[in-house]
Image: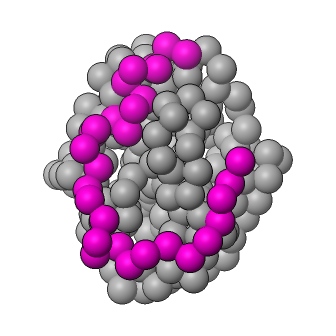
């Protein structure tokens, strides 16, 4: 159940203490129940906005199924970042043509390279607000001019307990995400809904 209300300013929040936000402990269960929801939307987004074979980083890649695999099957070059060692190992098995690294996304150096696209599905709201700001800034730095960032988070400013990890999840809400994107050098282009009703923010880095 989502409990929606105005959230305090992010400056007073602690940074995330568990790098995997609780996902390492339940990695096997997550792999077993992860559905294909969102994969078709993400692949269609990449095909619409990026050139074939373009490099895309999957931030919070999990096991690689279904997002990274859908992108790789579409002919894109995929890199994955996740803080759960078990999920990164599964990613390497599921998407063997992709590169992956185990580290917290908000602290990642993004392989020391730039990308035409970045996706982060089901991750950002697992982080405390300060880490959400850091992550968006790091993604911005890793994008090429004209690159795009697609991430999922509720439209409402709200918090709830994740059903798998029982840890707090926090959405900053559409207004604040728009402000954060603008401050870090990205422009919100549009929003999307997938077949499960999940909300996505689609941002572009001006060329």
Q: Position of residue 35 (x, y in %)?
A: 70, 28
Residue 145 to residue 120: above or below = below
Q: Position of residue 6 (x, y in %)?
A: 56, 76
Instruction: Write down the quadrant of residue 34 in the picture.
Output: top right
- Near-viewer residue (22 or 114): 22
The magenta region covers 1-29
Instruction: Determine the residue positioned at 46% across, 54% down.
Output: 124
- Residue 133 seen in render: yes
- In reply to whether residue 18 is colored magenta, the answer given is yes
> Position of 177 compared to 89: left or right?
right
Q: Position of residue 96 (x, y in %)?
A: 41, 20
- The quarter of the rendered structure image containing the C terminus is bottom left
Coloring scheme of the render?
A: one colour
- Near-viewer residue (174 or 71): 174
Instruction: Write down the quadrant of residue 171 in the picture.
Output: bottom right
Instruction: Determine the residue positioned at 44% across, 69% down.
Output: 147
Instruction: Write down the quadrant of residue 190 in the picture.
Output: bottom right
> Position of 27 compared to 195: left or right?
left
> Position of 133 compared to 69: left or right?
left
Instruction: Determine the residue positioned at 48% across, 64% down.
Output: 149
Residue 59 to residue 29: above or below = below
Instruction: Determine the residue positioned at 46% across, 40% down.
Output: 167
Secondary structure mostly seen in the magenta stretch: loop
- In reply to whether residue 33 is colored magenta, the answer given is no
Residue 167 to residue 34: above or below = below
Q: Position of residue 53 (x, y in %)?
A: 48, 47
- Near-viewer residue (59 or 48): 59
């Amino acid at each position: 159940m989502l409990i929606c209300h105005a959230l305090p300013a992010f400056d007073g929040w602690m940074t995330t203490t568990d790098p995997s936000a609780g996902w390492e402990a339940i990695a096997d269960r997550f792999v077993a129940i992860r559905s294909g929801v969102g994969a078709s939307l993400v692949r269609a987004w990449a095909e619409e906005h990026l050139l074939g074979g373009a490099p895309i980083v999957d931030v919070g890649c999990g096991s690689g199924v279904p997002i990274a695999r859908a992108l790789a099957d579409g002919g894109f070059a995929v890199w994955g970042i996740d803080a759960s060692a078990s999920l990164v190992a599964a990613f390497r098995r599921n998407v063997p043509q992709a590169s992956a690294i185990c580290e917290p996304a908000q602290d990642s150096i993004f392989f020391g390279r730039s990308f035409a696209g970045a996706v982060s599905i089901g991750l950002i709201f697992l982080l405390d607000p300060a880490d959400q700001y850091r992550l968006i800034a790091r993604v911005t730095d890793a994008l090429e001019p004209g690159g795009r960032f697609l991430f999922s988070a509720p439209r409402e400013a709200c918090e709830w307990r994740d059903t798998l990890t029982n840890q707090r999840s926090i959405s900053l809400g559409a207004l604040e995400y728009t402000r954060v994107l603008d401050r870090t050098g990205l422009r919100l282009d549009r929003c999307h809904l997938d077949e499960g009703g999940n909300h996505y923010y689609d941002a572009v880095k001006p060329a």
